[in-house]
Amino acid sequence: MTPGVTMEDGDFPRDDDDDDEPKARAGRDFYAALNVKRDASEDDIKRAYRRLAQVAHPDKQASPALREAAARDFNRLNEAYEVLTDKDRRRIYDVYGEAGLAAGLEVGHRHKTIAEISEEFERARAKEAQQRMEAKLNFRGSYGFSFSAAHLVDAEIAQRRRYVAYKRGAKLSSGLDLNGVDFNSVFDVPLASVLDDRATGYVGAQGQMSRGMGAGGLILGMRVAASEHTSWELATVLGSNQSAATLNTTRQLSEHTAGNLTYSYSDAQGGLGLAVGLERALFDEHTKGSLSWNVGPTSGMSTGVQRTKGRNSWKFDLSVGPASTGIAGFFARRWSKKTSFRFGFRAGTAAIDVDFGGTRRVGSDSAVGMSVSVGIRGVHLKLRFNHSGQRFSFPLLISPYQRLTPAIVMCALTVPWTIVAAVDRYLLSPAVAKKEATAKAKLRERHRERVRAAKAEAAEAAEMLRRDTEKRTEKERSANGLVVEEAVFGNFPERGVPRRGEPIVSGWGSDGGDDAWVDVTTALRFQVFDSSLDMIEGLDKAGMLGFCDPCPGEEKFLRVRYRYRGAMCEVTVGENDALALPNRSHLLPDEWNDGD
């Protein structure tokens, strides 16, 4: 890791899938077209194809318009079937999607092997990645500005501050006191043309200032991916007061285990140092354990476990040694795509404190955060702002530990959050909502004609399925089984439990021409068998027969209102989530069934 650029205690895990910039759909999902799992066998694919082909075959349609629509859908089913039943083409599609498949078909006429196709595709992608890397130096850094407001809270501290200023002949400011500044900034230097395309250098600077005294240094380093399993990094800091150097080697020892070895030198630690560590996946891919041993010159050991799955993440560490002994950890939860909350603690010889914090993204590359910590170092309010790799922190001392009172602690834990909640509700949220609404309107206008055509095709596909589904739906209804009453797919406002008679979405019953959703009731009824419906996780629902993408670039949901055993139910899932009907958790309140 680059010296000085480290993860702060108050940081939150970032959801890399989040992006405020709308993106177009990156190709068709052949598995969704046939409604099969990605690991489906050839027999499963054949059965799914035969079932869909029976209703989508042009010869099965009564009118010329439906025959034309059936021919289009039938060709799509054939294309999906041909790709997924060809082992070589399926391998390319699974790894590279339609782009790789198109490349394979193009070079296939020249009788190139799958390995050659893959190599050419990877080479093209690597060239593009290198061009992007060289076009951007990847500036990153951290900047801290420590302030004190203790004199504004405590009259005795204010009086002592005035006395010290009087003795020194200094002039006091009426606001906050600046206690210290620290910074660390580096940028990458591509070394492909000098050494190797696997090597990257970096250059930067760091500095600290506190109470009129300061120090700084020049950072020089290089990272090299020596092989598929081994990498190393050399970093030096040439400082005005002291210098340091580290050499870190990391190797993948097995599928689930990685080891690292670090040599270091600095005057502050009294010469050479050595540290070894292991990191291993525990239980599953979401949990990792670590063990490190600082051999010298100041010995110590630490171990920890960290788990990140879904919206939650937590970490617990234990360290033992003469320099520091104690425990530390945190629990964080991502409440939404843009907001996270965190609780952390430390207890040991170096520090005892707890902190509560939150972070909110305000753009594709920006985030703001705030936390409050209470411990033996006093009460601090910490503000943070991150933008495009630049991290700014503003710790503010509210009260030192010696002057803490229950009233100060209570105010520190409640007043900032009250202010933040008010600002968010009355200023930030309306502004963000207005910006998002404007961007969404522009996006929908740009795709208006394309969406209308896609909805028309989905409606034609639903009409093809209607005759087959009507008989089975009536059979389910007479048997008091599973009957899909209404289903909608697209972007629509979230809501709680609906009131009796409330439509499934606003505007339901209209033609839905310019709405960001599409009626998929018939398409869902087609998937009901023996009073059950199962949709596979990870499939692109927009690619299923009778579906379409009614709002390109926007988050989509599927909402289904159905009856089972006479009881009305409703469920909403994400566009790539699994769906299994019926389920007791989907039951609507009794008022929905009164009088039925």
Image: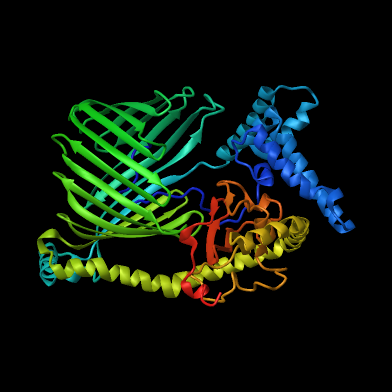
Picture coordinates of residue 112 (x, y %)?
A: 74, 22
Question: Is residue 318 visible from the viewing direction of this image?
Answer: yes
Residue 455 falls in image quadrant: bottom right
Q: How is the image coloured?
A: rainbow
**Left or right of 280: which side holds 26?**
right
What number of labels is visible? 0
The residue closer to the viewer here, 127 or 26, is 26
Instruction: Return the residue found at the far right.
Output: 64
**Left or right of 170: which side holds 459?**
right
Picture coordinates of residue 319 (x, y %)?
A: 20, 37
Q: Quadrant of the C terminus?
A: bottom right
Vertically, is 122 above or below 383?
above
The residue closer to the viewer here, 333 or 62, is 62
Question: Is residue 362 visible from the viewing direction of this image?
Answer: no
Residue 103 falls in image quadrant: top right
Picture coordinates of residue 267 (x, y %)?
A: 21, 31
Vertically, is 322 above or below 571?
above
Q: Please report the residue visible at 11 percent of the width from the left and 64 percent of the height from the top.
A: 403
Q: Please report the residue visible at 17 percent of the width from the left and 35 percent of the height from the top.
A: 320
Q: Quadrant of the N terminus?
A: top left
The residue closer to the viewer here, 490 or 370, is 490
The residue closer to the viewer here, 226 or 196, is 226
Picture coordinates of residue 81 (x, y %)?
A: 73, 38
